[in-house]
Amino acid sequence: MKSLVFIDSTEEGLKKSDLDLLGFLEESGQDVVAVAMGVKPNSFSPEEVPANLKSVFFHEDLRHYSPLGLAKALKTVMEKEQPQWVFSTASLKTKDFFPWLAADLNYGFINEVTDIKRAESKILVTKPLYAGKALAEIEAEKSFILVQANYMCGAFKRGGNPEELSFSLPQNPIAHQSFKIPEKKSKDLSEAEIIVSGGRGLQEPENFKMLEELAGLLGGEVGASRAVTDAGWQPYSRQVGQTGKTVTPRLYIACGISGAIQHLAGMQNSQVIVAINKDSSAPIFKKCTYGLVGDLFELVPEMIKALQKSS
Amino acid sequence: MNIAVPVRQVPDTGQPLKITDNTSSIDESRVKWILGPYDEFALEEALKLKPLLGGKIFTLSLGPERVKETLLHTLALGADEAIHINIEKEVRDPLTCAKILSEHLGKIPDLSLVFCGKLAVDTNDFAVPQMLARLLDFPFVTNVNSLEFKEGNFHLTRECGGGVEELLKASPPLVLSADKGLNQPRYPSLQGIMKAKKKPLQTVSSTQVQDTVPRYLNLSSPGEKPPPEMISGSPEEQIKKLIDFLKEKEKLL
């Protein structure tokens, strides 16, 4: 039984986390094919193309997100490939149109999966429930499955020769007006590999500049706790936690964040968690990999200095 | 034009949870149940839109008897009628929820807007609103963080990642899902609480199949994390040790 991986495509290229997932499924011995959709990458060198990439669908109009356009395109590919499971990484885009297509095709939809096991003709997946306080094991027959980014990674085989699909996009009943782009464009937190996050311990909104600098040196993004976004120091798009983003970066650095359950729910599945806090009894120290008790106003500049020196 | 707000009753996040011995569910004996936090944003926006759209606000929720308490809360906040879809079993699968809800949404006359929270915080699924849109054949916009209704159209903003926002224009009928930042939900007034008891709260049953795929098999507690490596010393020493760990052991830098 076949699996299909949906790979998001932008000008910068095919999305890394989707390629990692394809590699993971190949390495675990699945019968897997992939499709890439979106805007055509600026460079698309043949040797970089995954061997199992069977088709691509590039359309200029996909520069504006078009849920029905992507759904129609993916449905066309599914009719041809007849996959039992459709995988991708959980992003604002896939979380948006996969459920619509699941209802359309009467497939299951399982979001934010952290583990996949193959058992004979079935796939068993694990997903956290109740803010990570429980893990559910789910039997997935005919399902759309979104995995958390940076979780399941493998090296994909190269050398494919995908068929380029072409068809017109359906008329979107919702009219796009414009985009509001922030001065500094950043990656969405749910896809970031490194996140430097700040809480109330930063004391003032201006102090986030220090975290921006650290994140910049690490090639990561800045996140924030609920207290900080509620106070208006940072936009809601940067909030990590239950009423914010669920993130699974390779490295999460929590600065001046005490670690309320609400916050932990959004970041506890990060691979490596560094906690910097002056209160040694802060709950964040129970969930971290490395804990530094101390003054973040000394430790963060020290880390910036050390990274500048080594680069 | 009537508005429907499907809501989900969820355990309050701040409390610990215990899984039952048969691993099928959580021990409900000490759970404090609340209205889903994103559903609060959806209901608040519906309350603001009601004078502009005319019509009534219907809230719906599926689940056992206890769900009525949450529906009563929505009536106290200002909803006009509530529909309790009585199902004993905990339904976690989003498509099953959407099918059950759409069956009853279809019975609401002159339905022009279905306003949902963007996700349910118990399952963290971000799915029911889009599924309802497909089942009702309504267009949809998720993640709405600002809204204005002018001359028969909704002018909406949605977050599309990395702080980028998209401005959209849409007309009813429509399914919308609310993000944080859309509004500041109100608290019920004493008068609202008194009035709620006199508002219609009907219990109905569902004809939809409840045992669908994917199947939830069992629940388990996440394993305890290994104790953290606490790094001490002067700030300079702490950072040096941290960077060594991140480089050598974690291969991150």
Image (cartoon, coloured by chain):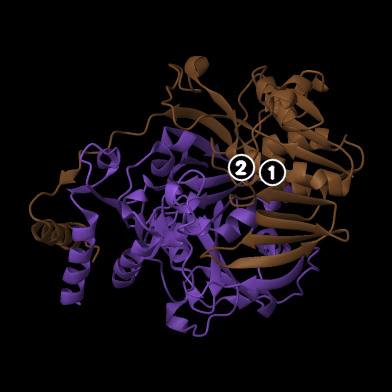
Q: Which quadrant holds residue A37?
A: bottom right
Residue highlighted by disc 1: B42
User: Do residues under tags 2 and 1 come within 8 Å of each other at their CB atoms?
Assistant: yes
Left or right: residue A177 versus residue B108 is left
| Image quadrant where one finds the C terminus of chain A | bottom left
**Chain identifier of the residue bearing label 1 in the image:** B
B33 is higher (above) or lower (below) than B126: above
What color was chain A assigned in the picture?
purple
**Chain identifier of the residue bearing label 2 in the image:** B
Q: Amino acid at mark 2?
A: Tyr
What residue occupies the far top of the structure in this picture? B29
Q: Amino acid at mark 1?
A: Ala
Q: Which mark is residue B38?
A: 2
Is residue B244 among what the camera can see? yes
At 65% from the left edge and 43% from the top edge, which residue is drawn?
B41
Left or right: residue B104 versus residue A19 is right
Callout 2: helix, strand or loop?
A: helix
- Residue B72 location (% of width, % of height): 71, 23
- Residue A150 location (% of width, % of height): 39, 57
Chain coloured brown: which letter?
A: B
At 36% from the left edge and 44% from the top edge, which residue is drawn?
A268
